[in-house]
Structure formats: C-alpha cells, structure tokens
Image (cartoon, rainbow, N blue to C red):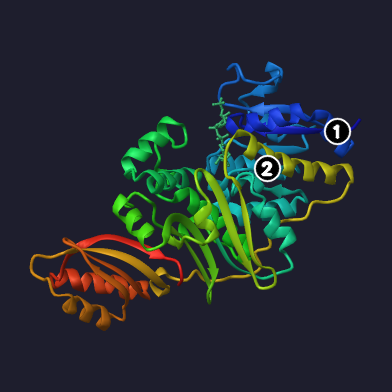
Amino acid sequence: MKQIKIGLLGFGTVGTGVSKLIEQQNEELQQRLQAELVIEKVLVRDASKKRDCSLAQEVFTTDVNEVISHPEIDIVVEVMGGVEHTKEYVKQALKHHKHVVTANKDMLSLHLKELSEIAEQNKVGLLFEASVGGAIPVIHSMTSTMSGDKITEIMGIMNGTTNYMLTKMTEEGLGFDEVLKEAQELGYAEADPTSDVDGLDAGRKIAVLASLGFHTEVTFDQVYIQGIRNISPKDIEYAKQWGYRIKLVGIAKDNNGVEVRVHPMMLKEKNLLSQVNDSFNAICLKGAGFGDSLLYGRGAGELPTGSAVLGDVMEIADSIVRNSPMKSLVSLYRDEKIVAMDAIVSKAFLRLQKSDDCKDWSKLEAVCKESGVSVLKQLEEKDEWVLAVESKEKDRNHALEVLKQQKLIAGCNSMIRMEGE
Ligand SMILES: NC(=O)c1ccc[n+]([C@@H]2O[C@H](COP(=O)([O-])OP(=O)(O)OC[C@H]3O[C@@H](n4cnc5c(N)ncnc54)[C@H](OP(=O)(O)O)[C@@H]3O)[C@@H](O)[C@H]2O)c1
C-alpha cells in the first residue's frame, strides 16, 4: 500500500494528539485513504526525552533539516509554536514542495498572506484548521461551504481560558484574581496568563478569520484589543440584573472597511453566545445569503486540536493519492482599510465614580449631550453613576475626559461595550 510520509515539527500537546489519533485509527484511515499515514521524523528540542507514544526513538531529531528537506516526507505538520524562526521553517518546507499543516495562529496572524503565496508558487497546500477554534471547523466552513456567499460579520468566543473564568465569575460571584488562580491550578490558564486574559490569543484568531472572511490582509497588530482584567464582580452583577452576560468576544465586520476587535461585551441573555460556557468556544457567522450560522465546540486540547490537524492531513493525503493539486484556502484579492475604533458606534455600560464636588446628575447629562452621547439608562448609587450610553467611541471618550476635567466625576470604574450597536 502507498505510504504518505509525515514530518512533525513539535511533539507537545498537539503533536502527541496527532500521533495518538493516527495510531488509534490506523486501519480506518488506511481504508478511507487507500494509503498509510506514517510519521517519519519529528523535530523536538530534546530528542532523548521519553515520550508517551509508540514511535521509535530514532524518529525524533533536533535537526529541522531532517524534516523539512527529507526527500520522502510529503506533509510537514507544524505544531511547535513560535513566530519568526517557525515561519522560516514553514517557508523552507513549502519551498521543498512539502504540503504544510499548521495550528499556529501567532504565525498566521502576521504572515498568512506571504506563506499562502509561497504555498501557491510551489503548488502545495497550506492548511490551518486547528489555528482558530481548535476542533470547530470554522476555517473550512468559511473557505468551502460559505465560499459562494458574502460574509458580513464574524463574532465569537475564541478563548477557552477567559470563557472558563467569566463563567466562574458569573456563576459563583468570584473575583478575577481568585478565578485566575483556580484556572491556573486546574491547568486551564498558563503560569503567564497574558496571552489569554489580555485578549491577545483571541486577537490573533480574529485577525486570521477577518482575512479569510473579508478577502483582505488583516494582521494581529491591526486588531483593537481589550482583555478581561478589569471585569469585576460588580460588573457581572449589573449585567445579570439588566439581563446580560459578559463574554470576551472577537468581532470582525464589514462596515465601509473592516472593523476588527476583541473586547469584553455584555450580550443579551438570549444571545446564543451567552449560552456558551466553561472552556467551550463558539463562532457566529453572518452571511448575505445563509443568514446566521453558529459553530460550537472545543477550542483546544490534545485530541480536539489533534483531530483538526489530522483532518487537514487527510485532505492533503487524499489529494496526493488522487494526484490532484491542492487549492489555496486564501484569496486576499481586496485591499480594505481597517475602520478606526474612534469611528465605531457602540453602546456601553459605564460605572462612573462620583466626585465630592458634584451630586447633580443634570450637569453630567449636559456634558453627555454636548459630546453627542445618548444616555439610554441611568442609575444613581451611593458612590457611582451607573449608565448605559450610545455614541461613537470617540465621543464617549471625549465626554469622559470632560467629566473628569470638570471634576463632575472622580473617574471611570468600568466601561463595557454592550450588544446592539
Ligand atoms: N495546545 C492546544 O490545545 C492548541 C490549540 C490550538 C492551537 N495550538 C497551537 O499549536 C501549536 C503547538 O501547541 P502545543 O500546545 O502542542 O505546544 P507544546 O505543548 O508547548 O509543544 C511544543 C513542541 O514543540 C517543540 N519545540 C518548541 N520549540 C522548538 C524549537 N525551537 N525547536 C525544536 N522543537 C521545538 C517542543 O519540543 P520538546 O518536546 O523537546 O520540548 C514540543 O515538543 C502552537 O502554535 C499553539 O498555538 C495549540
């Protein structure tokens, strides 16, 4: 039987998952493909380390060239992480006419265009289903099933760690620090949680989805990002009382250019994304023809992510068996501008610290009105004004500055955008 040879770059969580799935389903996969998948070489940092697998020790190497320029390897699976040096390895693999499967959103959110062009020039495939949403088939849905339609909006919960934390805060009334500690103890959050809690991980994913959805290059540095560090139990409580849930969402929208952002958002309880709890992810797509579509599932983990990587491997292997060329997933033929955050109209929940000098709401109301900020709801608490407002981002920021300068408030304790822009 024909053998299709795979070279892995990395054998950590995802690499181990891929290897386990190939081993467990070997016979089934052979029947489906009429070929056998064989892991030929694996790049790691420490080749002598004992690994949880049945691969022979000599399969492991610390020399990347033994993988990316191996004459018999057909598919290079990049699951090592990192950006610049990894990009060089992927480029070299493509130039050696290897098909590449990667789960690396950090690299793709900066270099998707360049890498997909190199793949095309070398007539090989570059697939990356696992890079966004783990096991959720969002990339294939967007680039295949929905490819005849015009996508107008992408909105999703794309980070399991923060969703787990916000769920705990909502259900148990715990504070951010307490929940983070618990998430770290359970292995949901890294020792350095920055990438998750500050929204960077979700920012990388929405950059990749925005590029695919709007056919224009969107890179990580163009995404507006705000994380969840400032969300307090008080915010969660108000959200509940007002019929909302707070979620960290990634949004990309067609709006005379592309809006692309990650921030906490108060979503109506009945919004399907409000029902996505714990470490689950979900992505809601809007299309001119198909309407709304919600994809839900596990966004990370050894087997879920391994399964998405293996799906890409199977697609490439099938094209090799049938001797048919791989089609590029990426067509970045437009050159859209990124809409400045200042110009976006949004609703927001505000908790404003009262100043000692002003207890008179009408003075605050006048500043809001002059700045073009509509007040939709207003509550007076002992120490705070609690509001829901609607305006351009720029006008809301201006109003807050004026209120502080005129000492009408002592500060802004919380600003969370609300559904319904
Ligand atoms: N974990 C998930 O659930 C998940 C989900 C979606 C996407 N991803 C993406 O998948 C990729 C891999 O994630 P992971 O969680 O599997 O990572 P990981 O557990 O940290 O594993 C990384 C692997 O790469 C090897 N490696 C790292 N740098 C290397 C270098 N410079 N030279 C040689 N080998 C190197 C390591 O070797 P040693 O074993 O010798 O240390 C290890 O085997 C990342 O891009 C990540 O963003 C992960």
| 390 w.r.t. 413: above or below | below
**In the displayed structure image, the side of residue 40 where residue 132 appears, left or right:** left
**What residue does disc 2 label?**
308
Q: Which mark is residue 30?
A: 1
- Image-quadrant location for residue 366: bottom left
Between residues 306 and 72, which one lies in front from this camera angle?
A: 306
**In the displayed structure image, the side of residue 413 where residue 271 appears, left or right:** right
| Image quadrant occupied by the N terminus | top right
**In the displayed structure image, the side of residue 15 where residue 147 appears, left or right:** right
Q: Residue at x 69, y 18 (%)?
A: 58
Residue type, label 1:
Gln
Q: Residues within 10 Å of mark 2 (few under 14, many from 20)?
A: many
The quarter of the image that holds ligand 1 is: top right
Q: Which mark is residue 388?
A: none
Residue type, label 2:
Ala
Asked whether mark 2 and ligand 1 are closer than 8 Å, the reply comes as: yes
Residue 267, x across and y down, in percent: 45, 61
Secondary structure of residue under mark 2: helix
Residue 318, x across and y down, in percent: 84, 44
| 403 w.r.t. 272: above or below | below
Label 2 vs 1, first from the N-terminus: 1
Q: Residue at x 68, y 56 (%)?
A: 117
| 187 w.r.t. 275: above or below | above
